[in-house]
Amino acid sequence: MEFVKVSLNSFLEYLQIEKNYSQYTVDCYEKDIESFISFLEAEQIQNLQDVTYADARLFLTRLYEKSYSKKSMSRKISCLRSFYRYLYREQIVVENPFALVSLPKKDQYTPRFLYAEELMKLFELNDLTTPLGQRNQALLELMYATGIRVSECAAIQLSDIDFSLQTLLVHGKGKKQRYVPFGKYAKDSLHTYIQNGRVQLKSKSATNTNALFLNNRGTTLTDRGIRLVIEKLMNKTAENIHISPHVLRHTFATHLLNEGADLRTVQELLGHENLSTTQIYTHVTKDRLKTVYMNHHPRA
């Protein structure tokens, strides 16, 4: 299986160098392909070129048996399809056994979002007299104001923020960049954190960093660290409010559409490559459309 792992490493380098994929995406590809390699070992298949369409179908069956979600199975199959496409290009295999494997039909998915009153309760949780409280407030305000992904939030540098124009330079998937505006609440909380809380946090470390969000040791707050911050805030709420960085992103998009923003604008702000990805938010705006219709149609 040694050559299999060499091929995997070569593919991961291709994703980083030629495709400009983020480290997080590359790590996800690596995990998915390693699970497939474990499957090959269990089935005593020694070479990548020996994998057939029947083996690919069997792998999908194994995923079903392990109760993987349809989304996870689709991701794994898409990953392996790309892997074999690369192997075919490099003439390591003569066919792609995953080319004809059908992806499971996706479940209908309605994004979870927060209502205005739930958001207000979140914004009232932080102790703004402490460095971590100021950081958490700035984190919440900025994520809700811009709808950025957690990986994009962790990557923000001080130089990415333009306070005069109230815009944020976001480093998105595939190293694509976009500018996203933010409002007064985010601006004020960022000012407070940068001028006070961040200074105190940075003094705890000898490492010089320009990252916007720092942890309690004064070093860069990671993706996982941001998730933990949000999780702790959720546990502080007296009511059963489920929040995550992605729920804040969903809330950003839903509130914009509810207030009349067009889908193309929301697509650009979210950094979605395809409009179909943004269209999932139209499901949660039906109540608003009904209200507008009832209030304005002459024969409603």
Image (cartoon, rainbow, N blue to C red):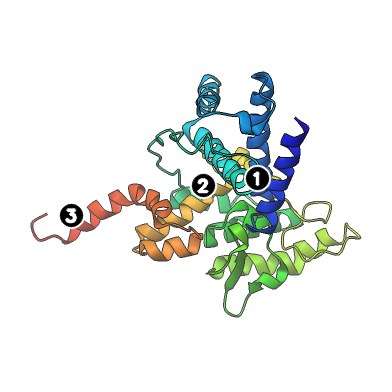
Give the foreground label among 2 and 3. Answer: 2
Name the residue tied to disc 1: 227
Q: Name the kind of residue labelled 2 in the image.
A: Val
**Label 2 with label 3: CB-CB less than 8 Å:** no
User: As drawn, which residue projects farthest toward the left?
Assistant: 299
Question: Label 2 crowding class (10 Å Cα cut-off): few <14, some 14-19, many 20+?
Answer: some
First in residue order: circle 2 vs circle 1: 1
**Towards the viewer: 231 or 177:** 177
Name the residue tied to disc 2: 247
Above or below, comparing residue 164 to residue 150 in the picture: below
Above or below, comparing residue 247 to residue 134 in the picture: above
Spot occupied by residue 185 in the image (x, y as percentages of width and height): 56, 66
Q: Quadrant of residue 50?
A: top right
Can residue 93 be spotted in the picture? yes
Tell me the distance, in whole angstroms, between the alpha carbons under discs 2 and 1: 11 Å
Can residue 128 be spotted in the picture? no
First in residue order: circle 3 vs circle 1: 1
Q: Name the kind of residue labelled 3 in the image.
A: Met
The C terminus lies in quadrant: bottom left
Tell me the distance, in whole angstroms, between the alpha carbons under discs 3 and 1: 40 Å
SS of the residue under disc 3: helix
The N terminus lies in quadrant: top right
Q: Residue at x 61, y 47 (%)?
A: 86
Which mark, by number, is residue 294? 3
**Label 2 with label 1: CB-CB less than 8 Å:** no
Q: Residue at x 63, y 43 (%)?
A: 87
* Residue 266 shown left or right of residue 86 in the figure: left
Question: Label 3 crowding class (10 Å Cα cut-off): few <14, some 14-19, many 20+?
Answer: few
* Residue 240 shown left or right of residue 35 in the figure: left
